[in-house]
Amino acid sequence: MLLRLLSLLLLIALWQAASMVAASRLLPPPLAVLAVIGREAHSHALYFNLATTLARVAVAFTLAMLLGTIFGIWMGRSATFNRLGDPWLVILLNLPALVIIVLAYVWLGLTDVAAVLAVALNKFPNTVVTIREGARALDPGLEEMATVFAMPWQTRFKHVMLPQLAPYIAAATRAGLSLVWKIVLVVELMGRSNGVGFEIGSAFQLFDVALLLAYALPFVGIMLAIETFLVQPFERHVSRWRPKAA
Amino acid sequence: MSPVGDPKQLEVFVRRKAFHAANGGQREVLRDFSLTLEAGKIHALVGPSGYGKTTLLRIIIGLDRDFEGWVRLPPETKIGVVFQEPRLLPWRSVLDNLKLAAPLAAVEDLTKLADDLGIGDHLHNFPGELSLGQARGVALARALAIAPNLLVLDEPFVSLDEALARRLASEVAMLVERRLVTTLLVTHDIDEAIRLADHILLLGRRPAEIVGNIDVTLPRRAMTADYAAKTKAQIGAILAETSV
């Protein structure tokens, strides 16, 4: 923990040094960015835009994880369904994010629904692929045990299957959060009039690097906090049964 | 065999059971095989490995339906199974493992059962923290927890040290006797079969058939060293004659 903090401080120090050497408004020093953050926070624009983006991230992420998990389990368990779904999956995986975003906006209009759907559709195939691996690795011995003891499907799902999928769900979550928030910014830049992505777009047009960083950094901070205070504790909780390494 | 009119707990008839071999052919494991279990008695199915013991067991407990023949169980038979490996849920505590298999059982009963099988101190441990013997104990407790009327045990005491295996086995025999649970014990250990069973069924030849059916007239606590030795000699003679 201390080492991580130290490494972070080093990064800030390097930034400070570089800004002093460059002495340009295209690389503002950390304190200048902090001042802009303060200004934006004071006018509540920062909170509003962060909240808007966060809400889009949350909806798109939930949608992609939920559907991705269902289809992943399905494809991992059924060879027929896997053969049917696999070509679609390969197409989705290889469709550039930009294409999906533009198509969503063209077909559904410049709306929040289109924005969120485009993001979810970008994340969805990765979730499917990860969860499918997990579903393929399910222990048949435990499944037989559940069958013999006539466990109802709720018990089988919650106590037999989900714990086995937990590491895969955690991996999909971790990879998914960073992917989703990056794509949300692009979506906002292209077709929304609020959110962090929109603000960064404005900053780009004004070449206002301080404003750009003032929006990007707090959001990175939030995602870091979610990872540290939600994802990691969850992972520790679901893997508490694993014997600790000596 | 048992006289007509005796309550039968289980009848199984396998006309044919074959596995697909890697070379594209078929390997027949069972043909025209029939087996009857008497209600409330302990039956040991003994034979060398590779003679279809586990296959037969999987057919009986309904995990293998890809065979020609039938299995006849009394209606609403509850089957408790102990697999060769304990097959516990590693992410749930011992007590939760028992509760999930037997949601209707009272916690006091589960605790009592766990005490009987020597795992009472480990109810709140995860299976990964147990020794193999303790994990086997949990698997036995789980099978008994559902109050089965048919108990199927697949080599439940294998690779345990002798003393522990004996202790667990006698605990199980006592619990089963008290509740009159029809039991099928699959084992390759002839001594274990003699110690525990009312009936010993010997499996031999290929495809497998029952080559010997020995009624133990002095089962378990009534067993004498002399009787055990005689039975063992009898079994040895049959197996020597029929094993290929």
Image (cartoon, coloured by chain):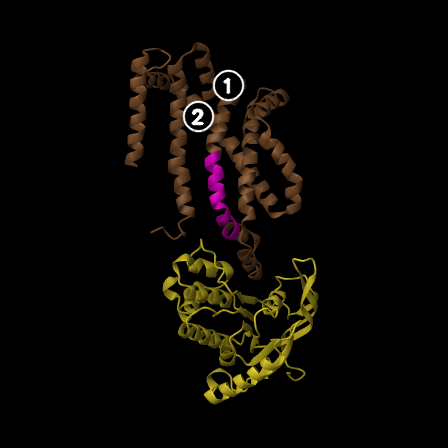
Chain colours: A brown, B yellow
Q: Is residue A236 left or right of residue A91?
A: left
Mark 2 residue crowding within 10 angstroms, few (<14) / some (14–19) / many (20+): some
Q: Is residue A186 left or right of residue A239?
A: right
- Residue at image mark 2: A51
**Between discs 2 and 1, the one toward the N terminus:** 2
B94 in magenta? no
Relative to residue B35, is residue B127 depicted above or below? Answer: above
Q: Nearer the viewer, residue A2 or B91?
A: A2
Label 2: which secondary element: helix
The part of the image, by quadrant, that contains residue B6 is bottom right
Q: Which residues are magenta?
A: A159-175
x, y (%) of residue B39?
59, 77
What is the three-letter code of the residue carrying label 1? Leu
Q: Is residue B115 left or right of residue B11?
A: left
Is there any visible trace of residue B38 in the rendered image? Answer: no
What is the three-letter code of the residue carrying label 2? Ala
Q: Quadrant of the N terminus of chain A?
A: top left
Q: Nearer the viewer, residue A52 or B190?
A: B190
Relative to residue A131, is residue A10 depicted above or below? Answer: above
Q: Chain of mark 2?
A: A
Relative to residue A170, is residue B10 depicted above or below? Answer: below
A174 in magenta? yes
Which of the labelled discs sits on residue A189, or is there none? Answer: 1
